């Protein structure tokens, strides 16, 4: 079982919002879908969940095209910033509607989360703060029976305690009932521990897909006197170099030379730094 | 020169949204104002900037009450989630309006930031994404001549690269023209390096004010077998204990005993963990 994005292109106002995306989401894995603002993540998620249509290419679940395919779409859930529910609805009505639509709603989990987050299910969705609206949507997303759950900006407006609580619930429900989760967020460092694989999208293109382990293993920082750092990294794969006076920090991937000058300090690169360096734009510096 | 919050209480629907807040913001310092969702941060910021009135107490700038005091309010700027500008306005018109109101707008800095963030100043505010709307507001906040700048959720919707760029601009403008910045955000760990002092608010009360250095110096984690950790921390100041099977992690502050059992690992506590443990609510656990 897998969800395959098959050469998906989306042309919008004569621009390629998505450009020939080829990608497979395997079953029972947790993915990070990472990209800058405007990179095309939400467009891709909308196409996967049949809220938008590709200009070319297709999305297939177990070989079946998902477009307008109710049977396939029953297995795909997208939590997104857009509010699809009529705003006078109460939180508990949203849960009931979701049960009606997808069946088999996990009320045990939902009630457990309602209590832990101190959410009042009798409140109307539109009365909730940004943070609590996210919480109500997260509870829905974790309680529906779908095998592919996509979470677009899941922790928007959540305070640090609530974010931590959500990450715990996600891991617990994943252990109890493994399914595929795809998290798209700008808070990269916080979710690095949760992810098995990371997909980077930039300017509508898939630019990298790798395990978190591989990325953390291959990324290094070299900091030291500018001349020495520039010389030492000349033949390496350099993502970027930050200059500060006579000092430089180079962000590199791949193998390093066996010997480095003693003045150069070698450091690890975390997932967020890796992302920032990989997707930095020309002229985007101070 | 200083901004003094003098016993400010705000009663809202018969509840104390703020309860006798006593606090001084000194000149030319960078503060973090940290609290859970609903803790009272935005209410306090609205009172400081004359958008709301205290039920009791006052806010004084250099001894002058700020309430409806144009001269004092000229020196206080609040960037907040609420959009105070009429939505058909273009970004550049917002800058011009701010210049008209506060005078001495720093066009050099604004133009530098417009370029670095790749913001189109001819766009209407309401056409911008959440992230770019935050960027337009941040540029305004850093370019006005006020000595007290309050930033409520400054990086909402910004991707990791743009957040990093903003932190760099903040430090640079602070060095060039020192003034007081107060940052209120849920992304605590990212701003820990920027702050000199941190103010924690919970349930409308000031619960702690300290330098970041002191907090990082006093917070420790003790991890090991549950029985040993419970015994070792019995007479310590424990913020919280996380239990996981037979293992426990205790979050403690203050002095530790000279000797700890070898099975207990001692670790540092970062600012975000400190905050999470300090403000954890009863029953807020899985």
Image (cartoon, coloured by chain):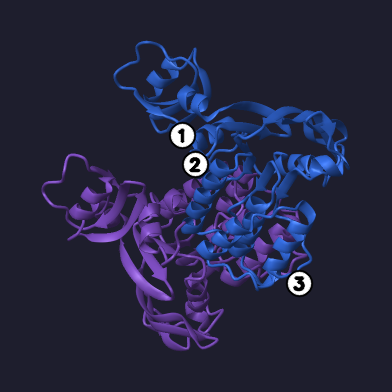
Chain colours: A blue, B purple
Label ID, residue B204 = none
Q: Secondary structure at mark 1?
A: loop
Quadrant assignment, res A177: top right
Question: Would residue B7 be found to the left or right of residue A162 on screen?
Answer: left
Label ID, residue A189 = 2
Would you call the spot at circle 3 few (<14 residues within 10 Å), some (14-19), or many (20 or more)? few
The residue labelled by disc 1 is A270
Residue B235 is situated, as x and y percent measured from the top left of the image, at 17, 61
Is residue A234 something one can see in this rendering?
yes
Q: Quadrant of the N terminus of chain B?
A: bottom left
Cα separation, mark 3 vs mark 1, equals: 43 Å
> Closer to the camera: disc 2 or disc 3?
3
- Dots 1 and 2: beta carbons under 8 Å? yes
Quadrant assignment, res A175: top right
Cα separation, mark 2 vs mark 3, equals: 36 Å
Is residue B160 something one can see in this rendering?
no
Instruction: Determine the residue positioned at 46% across, 34% down.
Output: A270
A110 vs B95, nearest the viewer: A110
B246 vs B122, nearest the viewer: B246
Q: Chain of mark 1?
A: A
- Dots 2 and 3: beta carbons under 8 Å? no
A265 vs A124, nearest the viewer: A124
Quadrant assignment, res A91: bottom right
Would you call the spot at circle 1 few (<14 residues within 10 Å), some (14-19), or many (20 or more)? some
Is the residue at mark 3 from the same chain as the one at mark 1? yes
The residue labelled by disc 3 is A88
């Amino acid at each position: 079982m897998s969800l395959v994005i098959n050469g998906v292109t989306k042309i919008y106002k004569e621009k390629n919002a998505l450009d020939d995306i080829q990608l497979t989401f395997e079953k029972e894995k947790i993915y990070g879908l990472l990209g800058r603002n405007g990179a095309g993540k939400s467009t891709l998620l909308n196409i996967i969940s049949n809220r938008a249509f590709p200009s070319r290419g297709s999305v297939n679940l177990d070989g079946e095209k998902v477009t307008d395919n109710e049977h396939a779409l029953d297995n795909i859930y997208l939590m997104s910033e857009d509010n699809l529910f009529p705003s006078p609805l109460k939180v508990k009505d949203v849960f009931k509607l979701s049960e009606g639509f997808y069946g088999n709603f996990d009320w045990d989990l939902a009630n457990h989360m309602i209590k832990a987050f101190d959410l009042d299910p009798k409140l109307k969705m539109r009365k909730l703060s940004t943070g609590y609206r996210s919480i109500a949507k997260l509870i829905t997303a974790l309680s529906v029976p779908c095998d592919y759950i996509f979470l677009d900006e899941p922790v928007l407006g959540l305070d640090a305690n609530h974010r931590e609580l959500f990450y715990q619930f996600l891991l617990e429900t994943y252990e109890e009932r493994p399914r595929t989760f795809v998290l798209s967020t700008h808070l990269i460092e916080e979710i690095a521990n949760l992810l098995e694989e990371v997909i980077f999208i930039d300017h509508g293109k898939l630019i990298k897909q790798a395990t978190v382990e591989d990325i953390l293993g291959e990324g290094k920082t070299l900091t030291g006197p500018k001349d020495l750092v520039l010389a030492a990294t000349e033949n390496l794969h350099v993502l970027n170099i930050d200059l500060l006076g006579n000092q430089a920090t180079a962000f590199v991937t791949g193998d390093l030379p066996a010997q480095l000058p003693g003045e150069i300090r070698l450091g690890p690169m975390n997932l967020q730094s890796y992302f920032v360096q990989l997707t930095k734009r020309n002229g985007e510096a101070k």
